[in-house]
Amino acid sequence: MSRLRFGVIGCGVIGGLHARVLSTYPPLAERARLVAVASPSPERAHRLAEETGSEATDVATLIERSDIDVVSVCTPSGLHAELGLRALAAGKHVVVEKPIDVTARAADRLITGARQAGRALAVISQRRFDPASRTLRAALDAEEFGTLTSGLVEVPLWRGQSYYDSGGWRGSRALDGGGALLNQGVHALDLLQWLMGPVVEVTAHTALKGHHGIEVEDVVTASLRHAGGALTSLLATTAAYPGRTTRLTVHGDRGSAVIDNDELTWFHAAGRQDTTSAYGAYGAGNQAAERCPAAPAGQRDASGLLPSPHGDQLLDFCDAVTEGRAPAVDGEEGRRALLTVLAVYEAARTGAVTQVAPAAETSPTPSSPMTPEQA
């Protein structure tokens, strides 16, 4: 089977993860090959290239290289569309880290550019590919939880002042776009919508409480209404010392589940023949272990991420390019997550109930299948 040749722009924490997954994740061995990495810091690029067996180069050269099929953009968020459009203009397929960009206009330009170029565009949302998330999605698709009623999203993280001071773009509206929600919480918000359906209406508050010298929030709370009528409460913060795990809870009238730190820690669904009692079954058996075993100890990387979900999303992207279909998390999916975040910010700014802008009416054009000459 043909191997797609990747170039990674950005050699920080996330760019490094992309490069390592591309060069070491076994299921990708016959589907992808890391060719080069690029960074404004030559030292950082050379260090990552040496580690991953790839070449170090500059951004402009990487985009124009004829031996690269896919450009993975792992830069400050406000540069995603700009670099993605340059790569599309050079005939490349594009993967961008979350969020798709920091404005709806930039997201729309990137989506339109991919459609016009006939190239695949994916936005990283690796938590959809966690075994726990897939297990829960399958249960919801099978209507095991009955009618979804409510949810809870908690992203109680800590980022010290040194985190924001480490790069001039961190905490800036131009390049970071937002704070605890757009940068850290958007993964959980995307996963929530994938599981419970799109958010259509929000009320929210934001604050800057634990940091200084930044333009964005470090605390956000929101009340969300989904298209199906379910209600969700959301908290995202980078001012919760010492930092706790991200937790997502889904409730229905016949079941509930909790995903904590990307693992299914609680799951209970009433059987189809079971009759629910007037006061429920508090303490009823936890079915999580039989549904989805926990990740083996030591499987996480130094940043606490599970490597396989990134690899599985990149594998889906390779399949999408080869088959000429849209990736599982395409530009429109990334746009939906961004628009929901922007609605939260608008609700916090105005103090009013805010509607989430609707998804685009037209579907993105799948990429053309990769030909043998492109391999």
Image (spheres, grey):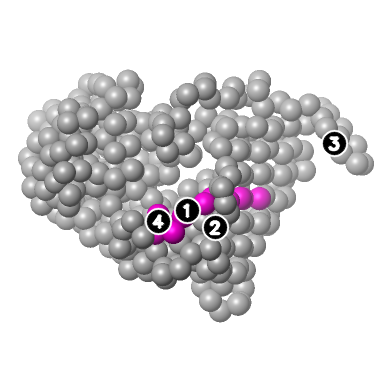
Would you name the residue on which mark 3 appears? Answer: 282
Q: Work out how far the residue at label 2 is from the one at label 3, CA to CA, in angstroms.
A: 33 Å
Counting residues from the start of the chain, the first of labels 2 and 3 encountered is: 2
Q: CA distance from mark 4 to mark 3?
A: 44 Å
Q: Earlier in the sequence, mark 2 or mark 1?
A: 1
Q: Secondary structure at mark 4?
A: helix
Characterize the local packing of mark 4: few (<14), some (14-19) or many (20 or more) Cα atoms within 10 angstroms: few
Three-letter code for the amino acid on which mark 1 is drawn: Arg
Report the amino acid beneath label 3: Tyr
* Residue drawn at point x = 33 percent, y = 68 percent: 174
Measure the C-alpha gap from mark 3 to mark 1: 36 Å
Viewer-nearest of labels 4 and 3?
A: 4
Quick one: which residue is furthest to the bottom in this view? 350
- Mark identifier at residue 239: 2
Q: In the rendered structure, which disc, 3 or 1, sits on the residue that comes first in sequence?
A: 1
| Image x and y of residue 187, in percent | 48, 48
> Would residue 161 be counted in the magenta stretch?
yes
Image coordinates for residue 206, horizontal then vertical, percent: 56, 68
* On-image quarter of the N terminus: top left
Between residues 319 and 338, which one lies in front from this camera angle?
Answer: 338
Q: Residues within 10 Å of mark 1 (few under 14, many from 20)?
A: some
Q: Amino acid at mark 4?
A: Ser
> Measuring 8% from the left and 47% from the top, which residue is drawn there?
61
Residue 92 visible in the current orientation: no
**Is 297 above or below relative to 128?**
above
Residue assigned mark 1: 159
Q: Which residue is mark 4?
A: 162
In whole angstroms, how far apart are the C-alphas of marks 4 and 2? 13 Å
